[in-house]
Amino acid sequence: MTAMPLPPPGDNRLGAITDDLAQKGWSWQPGFLPDALYRALREDVLAIDAEDELELAGVGRDDAFLLDRSIRRSRIAWMDRSTPAQAAFLDWAETLREAINRTLMIGLFEFEACFAVYRPGGFYDRHLDSFEGAKNRVVSLVVYLNEDWKAEDGGALLVWPEGAGEEAEPVAALLPEGAGVALMLSETIPHAVAATRATRYAIAAWWRVNPSVYGRVDPLS
């Protein structure tokens, strides 16, 4: 597997991300993914979609997992370093983990990521990525792999502030523009994916802390 050399994220962008997470719980960074990585990952997800190697996405984990098309309508494929693009992305994400841990000292430990494809009509209702205190997901990362996305294509990431009631309006509607990156605190920032009118390509990923006790490592299931 040929390595893909990438420039590290700049200190100014990393500082903006950690400041945003500390102050409001979420951050939007347009054009943050390196161009070579964006194009390689887009090729990967287009190939996976064309070969129909995607599974229906559900809600919840383990015994609470549920396929509910009234809440979430998308398809996913888990990343496993099987291509140079996936390996490079996971290495790039590690630089983010180190920067967030160094500045915010929240102990991000393990990482999981999947390609997420929303075909026309796809959506995901308002939700949190983790229940408070569960620590199975602490910081969420979303990376967009679309080209020439327009407002009329729909599919915006809707973001609410911590504690916002169900009747509250979102404070942001982020178009899934190529190479754009969103981060948010998984336990506290409600968000949703508005219905899309075009096929919407992204990576959805999460870091969690290590709940190990007595020297026992608790890996991702």
Image (cartoon, grey):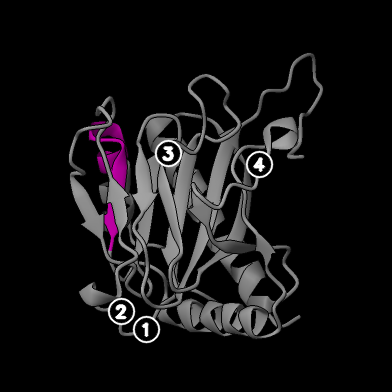
| Residue 149, numbered circle | 2
The residue that appears at 23% across and 56% down in the rendered structure is: 173
Q: Nearer the viewer, mark 4 or mark 2?
A: 4
C-beta proximity under 8 Å, tags 2 and 1:
yes
Query: Quarter of the image holding residue 29?
Result: bottom left
* Disc 3 residue crowd, few under 14, some 14–19, many 20+, Cα 10 Å: some
Q: Position of residue 207 (x, y in %)?
A: 56, 42
Residue 26 part of the magenta-drawn span: yes
Query: Quarter of the image holding residue 146?
Result: bottom left
Give the magenta-colored segment's residue range: 19-29
Q: Residue furthest top?
A: 214
Q: Which residue is mark 4?
A: 66
Q: Position of residue 187 (x, y in %)?
A: 44, 30
Compared across the picture, whether 168 is left or right of 91 comes to left
Mark 3 and mark 2: span between their CA atoms? 24 Å
* Disc 2 residue crowd, few under 14, some 14–19, many 20+, Cα 10 Å: some
Q: Nearer the viewer, mark 3 or mark 2?
A: 3
